[in-house]
Image: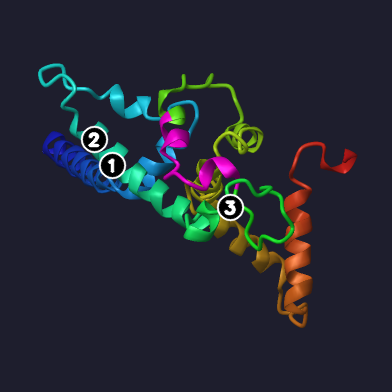
């Protein structure tokens, strides 16, 4: 009797675990996952190339979907930050740093769709796994200006909501029934200082 009960409990737990895995596995097919993975210089597009089906050769559905989705998003960013207009195309000899230009655009991006930048990134070798991803993008933003803007937006997305939830819990210790008249800006400042104090060597900077 106990064995049957134990078996049923194990089956229920295994089923619950499978459902949770399936829930998050499906989320891995969303746009954000594809874009953030490719923007990781330790993987780039190679992550999806490695999923190549041996029977179908280059007919890799994951790779095609990832590349198409990423390219569409790249084109969207490029059109916003480096728009191509008749005025820009007619002034290619103008100094790219001219103070007369409201939105100065580097010359190499004025008359093309930016895919030279994109292909250069796709074809480059993935970086070592020990690099700091955000520092890498900071150092390569001149080589990949559009991609660097994408990286700033996508790679700053927290992988988990736990830090935010922890922050709300900590604020409960700050705002008590005896101390409930603090202004919002004071609360933000205190929470910010508390967060900074958890950074190693912050007191030495």
In this picture, residue 53 sits left or right of residue 184:
left
> Is residue 37 in sight in this rendering?
yes
Q: In the rendered structure, which disc, 3 or 1, sits on the residue that comes first in sequence? A: 1
Quadrant where the N terminus sits is: top left
Which stretch did the figure color magenta?
Answer: 106-119
Q: CA distance from mark 2 to mark 3?
A: 37 Å
Element carrying mark 1: helix
**Residue at point 29% right, 21% down?**
50
Q: Quadrant of residue 52?
A: top left
Q: Magenta span has 191? A: no
**Residue at point 48% right, 59% down?**
86
Mark 2 touches mark 1? (CB < 8 Å):
yes
* Residue density around tag 3, few if under 14, some if 14–19, many if 20 or more, within 10 Å: few
Instruction: Kindly identify which residue carries mark 1.
Output: 68
x, y percentage for residue 135? 65, 34
Above or below 149: residue 128:
above
> Which numbered tag is attached to residue 64?
2
Q: In the rendered structure, which disc, 2 or 3, sits on the residue that comes first in sequence? A: 2
Tag nearer the camera, 2 or 3 = 3
In this picture, residue 173 sits left or right of residue 124:
right
* Residue density around tag 1, few if under 14, some if 14–19, many if 20 or more, within 10 Å: few
Residue lying farthest bottom?
181
Q: Magenta span has 108? A: yes
Instruction: Kindly identify which residue carries mark 3.
Output: 91
* Residue density around tag 2, few if under 14, some if 14–19, many if 20 or more, within 10 Å: some
Q: CA distance from mark 2 to mark 1?
A: 6 Å
């Amino acid at each position: 009797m106990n064995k049957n009960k134990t078996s049923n409990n194990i089956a229920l737990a295994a089923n619950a675990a499978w459902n949770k895995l399936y829930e998050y596995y499906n989320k891995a097919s969303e746009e954000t996952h594809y874009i953030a993975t490719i923007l990781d210089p330790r993987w780039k597009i190679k992550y999806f190339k490695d999923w190549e089906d041996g029977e179908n050769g280059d007919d890799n559905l994951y790779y095609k979907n990832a590349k198409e989705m990423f390219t569409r998003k790249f084109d969207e960013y490029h059109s916003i930050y480096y728009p191509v207009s008749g005025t820009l195309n007619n002034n290619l000899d103008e100094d790219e740093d001219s103070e007369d230009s409201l939105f100065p655009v580097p010359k190499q991006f004025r008359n093309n769709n930016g895919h030279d930048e994109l292909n250069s990134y796709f074809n480059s070798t993935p970086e070592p796994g020990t690099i700091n991803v955000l520092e890498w993008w900071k150092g390569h933003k001149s080589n990949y200006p559009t991609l660097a803007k994408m990286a700033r937006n996508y790679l700053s997305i927290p992988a988990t909501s736990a830090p935010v939830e922890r922050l709300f819990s900590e604020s409960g210790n700050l705002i008590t029934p005896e101390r409930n008249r603090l202004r919002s800006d004071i609360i933000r400042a205190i929470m910010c200082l508390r967060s900074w104090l958890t950074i190693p060597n912050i007191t030495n900077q």
